[in-house]
Amino acid sequence: MNTVLGAALSRQMQTESMLSMQDFEVLVHLTDIDDARLRVSELAKAMRWEKSRLSHHLSRMEKRGLIGREECSSDGRGAFIVLTPEGRAAIEAAAPSHVDAVRRHFFAVLTDDDVKALNSIADRVIARVEATDTCPSE
Amino acid sequence: MNTVLGAALSRQMQTESMLSMQDFEVLVHLTDIDDARLRVSELAKAMRWEKSRLSHHLSRMEKRGLIGREECSSDGRGAFIVLTPEGRAAIEAAAPSHVDAVRRHFFAVLTDDDVKALNSIADRVIARVEATDTCPSE
DNA sequence: ACGGAATAGTTGACACGTCATCCAAGTTCG
DNA sequence: CGAACTTGGATGACGTGTCAACTATTCCGT
């Protein structure tokens, strides 16, 4: 399901909006906050991405003009990621049809109980994985 | 859930068995059949992979000695993929702990009803995506 | 204040996925 | 038979993900 659904959604976004799902995720996280300006590590944590992956991806997005980098005066190491006008335009163009695709491909065939069940399952699995993955006895 | 679970499982397999999830999938499909000899397109269809992706991956696996290619006499274009002894050894070494990881990370937190619900959901979503994706009005 | 650790982020090498393209072997039909 | 078309599969270019190594800054203990 995962494979098939993901492929369908990313194909749709790619052909209609020239954005990958990953681009979209980054842009979503940037628009979610008020001043559209975020430290790289904050972003990485919010997205559950490795810093390296994010850094690579940001370079590519910067090259395409979707985001920009700004120096951080309070911490000389850091960098702010900012959403450019082009980036904002891109996500605003992409979002509606993406939402629609998710509705059509996914929620259209689910009942409310299905959604509740999925939520509960996902919560438990994530908790389980993150528990055994980070801390313990293993 | 998908992201987190997939990452955990592939990390586990990589560190314990030097195989990626994709390697594993290929090997599973090859051991599933009796004479461990399959046409590339059959394999691609069974795995729901693009032919190109499979071809690239098989090249990498061949370089590592996990599989081999054999000419097909009945169809001069074709190639058979065969499982090498190394490949068989690799999957037999990897399988038990992978199964165990899936059980621990996933099934351990699911009830029977959860599993039934998930199965039903996945069936519906896949049917839906494949219906709207291949044939119709769009 | 100074030297070692931690932190922020980048980079390079390499594995992987997709797309478009290509080629050779088969198929169809005049 | 032979030209157009299809099919099996490989390849190259390019975008993406991971790991390990690296640089530069900041933090912290003495």
Image (cartoon, coloured by chain):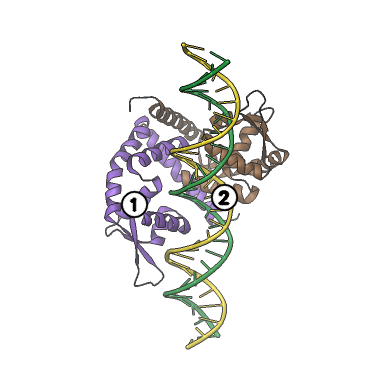
Chain colours: A brown, B purple, C green, D yellow
Q: Chain of mark 1?
A: B
Label 1's element? helix
Q: Which residue bears the numbered disc 1?
A: B27
Q: Residue at x 36, y 41 (%)?
A: B13
**Residue type highlighted by circle 1:** Leu
**Residue A52 locus on image (x, y percent):** 53, 37
Q: CA distance from mark 1 to mark 2?
A: 28 Å
Counting from the top left corner in percent of width and height, residue C30 is at 55, 85
C25 in relation to B91, above or below:
below
Above or below — where is B10 with respect to B62?
above
Residue in the foreground of this view, choosing between D14 and A94: D14
Q: Quadrant of the C terminus of chain B?
A: bottom right
Q: Is residue B112 in view?
A: no
Residue for point 38% across, 34% down: B106
A36 left or right, relative to D8: right
Question: Is the residue marked by circle 2 packed among few (<14), some (14-19), or many (20+) residues within 10 Å?
Answer: some
Location of residue C13 with respect to B118 vertically, above or below: below
Callouts 1 and 2 on one subunit: no
Helix, strand or loop under label 2: helix
Q: Which residue is mark 2?
A: A11
Query: Callout 2, which amino acid?
Result: Arg
Q: Is residue B78 left or right of residue A51?
A: left
